[in-house]
Image (cartoon, rainbow, N blue to C red):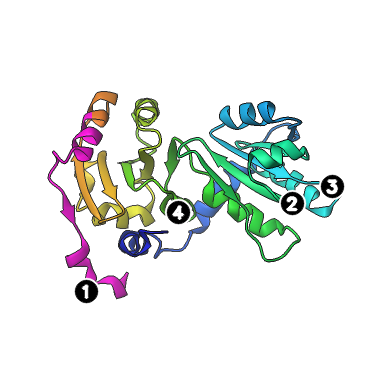
Amino acid sequence: MDSAPSRCLFLLFLITWELSPDIAAEIQDSSDGPGASQEPVWLTDVPAAMEFVAAAEVAVIGFFQDVEIPAVTIFHSMVQKFQDVAFGISSDPKVWAHYNITENTISLFRLVDNEQLDLESEDPEIDATKLSRFIEINNLRLVTEYNSVTVIGLFNSMIQIHLLLIMNKASSEYEETMLRYQKAAKLFQGKILFILVDSGVKENGKVISFFKLKESQLPALAIYRTVDDEWATLPMAEVSVERVQNFCDGFLEGEWPRENHESEEKSSKVEL
């Protein structure tokens, strides 16, 4: 990544805690949710593949010349594990050429930043653990919930501005707030990554303190630019599409007073 050095400060700050058993279980439950057995969609031509990718927030396509190889069995197991992700398979040479595929591989496509990410492995055999983590890390959506897995994918995205909604998911206002936040996210698709940080999760306290926020100021918005570590915050009693839009526009246009943690955090990096 071109801006990797400047991204290190916030990334280091956020991933210094391990995934707690409760959070790990929550991620596992969301992936292994109940439902009927699913099968990947066969993509036999380029128009079908393009329509498939465009229709999903996150789509995963297995490019296999031979569908009898062990890798296809592993791929099918991911279909059952990640039931909120669209899965497809293609052996069509024109589809391969359209997505610049030259050998058996698995690619993930994201609507939020129009990225195509190809699974990279030195081992020609696809490993189930690596494939599962590849999908977990890169499963970014119009609104992505922050945890120590998704934060890696967030900072690997080419989008350099992140907007965080920090609020307690147990709040009675959560559902309606998320609907408005998702509507706002569509307005900035490809420009800003929208993230949800659950303030009810103890480990997320570091995110709150990084932005100098207090529990009494939540819910709040925090916007952060990875290339130079500049950020701004806006506590608000009620989150509306208009206020989110104005906050984002103001930051993009340089109208909001910004802060930078670089100088004050340098001395404490080792402790994080």
Image quadrant holding the C terminus, namely bottom left
Magenta highlight range = 246-272
Q: Amino acid at mark 2?
A: Asn
Instruction: Indicate the position of residue 167 as horizontal and vertical percent values.
Output: 32, 40
Observer-nearest residue: 243 or 58?
A: 58
Residue shown at the point (45%, 40%) measured from the top left:
113
Q: Which residue is mark 1?
A: 267
* Picture quarter with the N terminus: bottom left
Q: Earlier in the sequence, mark 2 or mark 3?
A: 3
Q: Amino acid at mark 4?
A: Asn
Mark 3: amino acid: Asp
Does residue 261 belong to the magenta stretch?
Answer: yes
Displayed quadrant of residue 267: bottom left
Say if mark 3 contacts mark 4, CB within 8 Å.
no
* Mark 2 burial class by Cα count in 10 Å: few <14, some 14-19, many 20+: some
Residue 104, numbered circle: 2
Which badge, 2 or 1, comes first in the chain's sequence? 2
Q: Which mark is residue 156?
A: 4
Nearer the camera: disc 1 or disc 3:
3
